[in-house]
Structures are given as structure tokens and as C-alpha cells.
Image: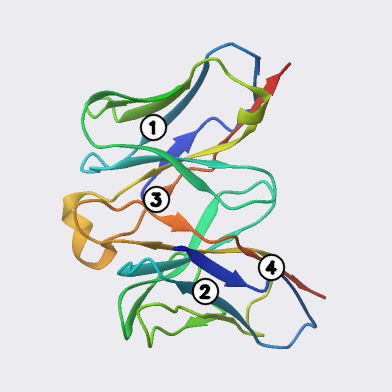
Amino acid sequence: DGGITQSPKYLFRKEGQNVTLSCEQNLNHDAMYWYRQDPGQGLRLIYYSQIVNDFQKGDIAEGYSVSREKKESFPLTVTSAQKNPTAFYLCASSLLGSSYEQYFGPGTRLTVT
Amino acid sequence: QKEVEQNSGPLSVPEGAIASLNCTYSDRGSQSFFWYRQYSGKSPELIMFIYSNGDKEDGRFTAQLNKASQYVSLLIRDSQPSDSATYLCAVTPGWADRGSTLGRLYFGRGTQLTVWP
């Protein structure tokens, strides 16, 4: 089955701890993206990567870090510097070329107390 | 910051009616436009995309694009309770920004649709 997987579905952490969210895709897509969604809010872009070993900051990158060592994988680390980390985190991927539609994984719901 | 505006709703229509969802965007150079459906607690799902002015139909869904007015809409015919969800509009950046923002989409906040039986 082709698709985007995110794990875990639910994640609980204590304040002050770093946490890494996993995102894997087997669609052979070039680009990958991380979004954050808060209740009743739209999607806010955290980071994105167009190619392996390169990534760009989105609109709310502070307190987050990413890596893109493989085309298939784009993990997101939520650091202790992120002031309000509790949110629904969505990973997406897309081909770069004639079309730019993004496909989303199922998401990870992070709760930090 | 590119602006993508949607009425937040909620939009409420009876079963069998036509639901009309609207989206305006600020970047005159935007080329591609997408509609996503998001059920409560789930991730967004792509339902339509449109690149050219005019209408594009896919089953009960019709996307309409008017680049001169910077306006894109989604019509849902014969609305069903299962269509109740939040609908997100997304656009690509204009050609001037393509290099560093290649692949990026700008999303609206979404319109919540409720279809009642």
C-alpha cells in the first residue's frame, strides 16, 4: 500500500522534554511538509523539504527542528523551547513538477503537560 | 504572507441541497487551487484541484475558478450528511516566489459544513 504513515497516533510528554514525531512516505514524492493544527484553526506550516538534506522554515518554525536524510523520511522534533506544543501535527508530501497537490498522513496528536 | 480567505461558517444546508463554499486569495500569480475535506479529528483529504478558469466537475463536486476575480468555489450537489466536515481551500504561490517556496501551499482556515437530514 502506498501512503504516508505517522507514528504514534497519540503522544504524551512532560513539559521540558524533547519529542520526535515520525513521518514516512512510500509514494516517491519529492517534497515533505509538517503542519500544526490547533482546535478550530487552519493549518500552519512548520517546516518543509523539497529535496534530501535541505529544508525550509515555514511560518512557525521556532521551537521545532527537522532533518531529511532520506527521501522517504522527514522526522519533526518538538523541543522544550516550543512554548505551546500541544496540538495536532500533520505530515504531508507532494511531487514537484506539473502538479503540487499535497497528501496528508493520519496525524499525531501531541499532548504536553 | 499570502492571504487565503474562507467564511468560517458554519454553513448549514438540508440533505439534497447544493452547498456552496467560497474562497478568495490575494496572490494574483497563483496557478493551482485545491479543495480538501477534513472530518473532525482526522487529517485533510484532497477532493478537487483546478488550474484553469471555469468549472471542473467530479461526481457531485464542482470546482469553479475565476482568476480575474481571484475567487475559487466548491459546489456540492445533492448534499449528504456524510459531507458534513470542514472544507479547506489551498493555493500555490505565484510564479515570482516559486524558487524557495516551490511546492508550498497556502491554506485558508476552512469552512465548516453541516448537512442535516
- Chain containing mark 4: A
**Where on the picture, by quarter, is residue A28?**
bottom left
| Side (left or right) of B38 relative to A54 | right
| Side (left or right) of B5 relative to B116 | left
Query: What amino acid is at disc 4?
Result: Lys
Q: Which residue is tagged 2?
A: A23
Residue at 39% x, 83% y is A68
- Chain containing mark 3: B
Considering the numbered disc 1 on the image, is that residue within a helix, a strand or a loop? Answer: strand
Residue at 34% x, 28% y is B71
Residue at 39% x, 50% y is B106
Distance (Cα) linking label 1 and label 2: 31 Å
Query: What amino acid is at disc 3?
Result: Tyr
Distance (Cα) linking label 4 and label 2: 11 Å
Q: Which residue is tagged 3?
A: B106
Distance (Cα) linking label 1 and label 4: 33 Å
Which label lies toward us, 4 or 3?
4
Name above or below for residue B34 compared with residue A56: above
Distance (Cα) linking label 3 and label 1: 12 Å
Pointer 4 and pointer 2: residues touching (CB < 8 Å)?
no
Q: Which mark is residue B24?
A: 1
Q: x and y percent of residue A80 in the render?
A: 67, 85
| Side (left or right) of A98 relative to A44 | left
Q: Which residue is tagged 4?
A: A9
View extreme (left): residue = B96
Label 3: few (<14), some or many (≥20) within 10 Å? Answer: many
Query: Is residue B112 or residue B6 the one in the foreground?
Result: B112
Query: What amino acid is at disc 1?
Result: Thr
Q: Earlier in the sequence, mark 4 or mark 2?
A: 4
| Side (left or right) of A40 relative to A105 | right
Query: Is residue B51 or residue A112 the one in the foreground?
Result: B51
